[in-house]
Amino acid sequence: MSTRGTDTKFGPAYGGPTRAPRRGVLERMVAVLALLLAVAALIVAILALTKKPPPAASPPAPTSHQGPTTDADRKLCQAIGPLMKENDDRSNAFLATGDPGSPQQDAALPKFVTDTQDWARRTQDVLDANAAPSRFLTRTLQRYVDDMQLFVASVRPGPGTKYDEAAWTDSIVAYGGPLATCQALGVQW
């Protein structure tokens, strides 16, 4: 009895090759194809290295919208200095009356609201007269004036709310713009 027909290294009884040798040919073809792709990628990489990259875009030229460098900023700082000091003094005096919701602060609240609204109107007039061109100082001062108006528009007697605290905190952040800009220009309040 011959085992030739069932031998896995040989094909059917006539002795032809099985699929194993064909798989070897396919594996060699895949390896050659991979090698060709690798060589092509290497050539592309070498060509890319030999080409000079395009020149980088030059940075934009500074404009008057950058930082505290303009005469307009100095003029605005000098104009708002007394108003900012007034607002600081009024805010500090209000905070010194007690905790939110205390009888002392509740009693001081109506005057604080009307005085702040009056301050906002006068400060807005100065800002409007000095807002062109728009720049960091004018944008942050506008934000501060708006934040103070929003705070006094919603604050009520009694314990403060999370919204009151958020509005107050936001106004303090906006205050940093005029403060830093004017201090950099030597204008203090």
Image (spheres, rainbow, N blue to C red):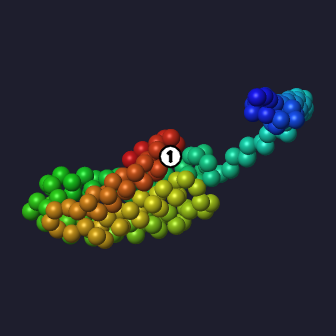
The reply to whether residue 7 is in sight is yes
Residue at coordinates 9% horizontally, 62% vertically from top-left?
A: 103
Residue at coordinates 52% horizontally, 43% vertically from top-left?
A: 185
Front one among 71 and 20: 20
Residue 58 position (above or below residue 118): above
Residue 37 position (above or below residue 98): above
The reply to whether residue 29 is in sight is no
Residue at coordinates 33% horizontally, 54% vertically from top-left?
A: 169
Q: How far across and how far down the image is residue 86, in percent?
A: 33, 56
Image quadrant occupied by the N terminus: top right
Q: In this figure, what is the number of numbered marks?
A: 1
SS category of the residue bearing label 1: helix
- The amino acid on which the numbered mark 1 sits, given as a three-letter code, is Thr
Residue at coordinates 40% horizontally, 69% vertically from top-left?
A: 121
Q: Is residue 85 shown left or right of residue 26? A: left
Q: How far across and how far down the image is residue 29, in percent?
A: 87, 34
Residue 116 position (above or below residue 88): below
Front one among 147 and 118: 147
Q: Is residue 59 shown left or right of residue 188? A: right
Q: Which residue is mark 1?
A: 181
Residue 92 position (above or below residue 8): below
Snapshot quadrant of residue 99: bottom left
Q: Is residue 32 shown left or right of residue 184? A: right
Q: Farthest residue toward the front?
A: 1
Q: How far across and how far down the image is residue 92, in percent?
A: 25, 52
Snapshot quadrant of residue 157: bottom left
Q: How far across and how far down the image is residue 79, in percent?
A: 47, 56
- What is the crowding at mark 1: few (fewer than 14 residues within 10 Å), some, or many (at least 20)? many
Q: Farthest residue toward the left?
A: 103
Snapshot quadrant of residue 41: top right
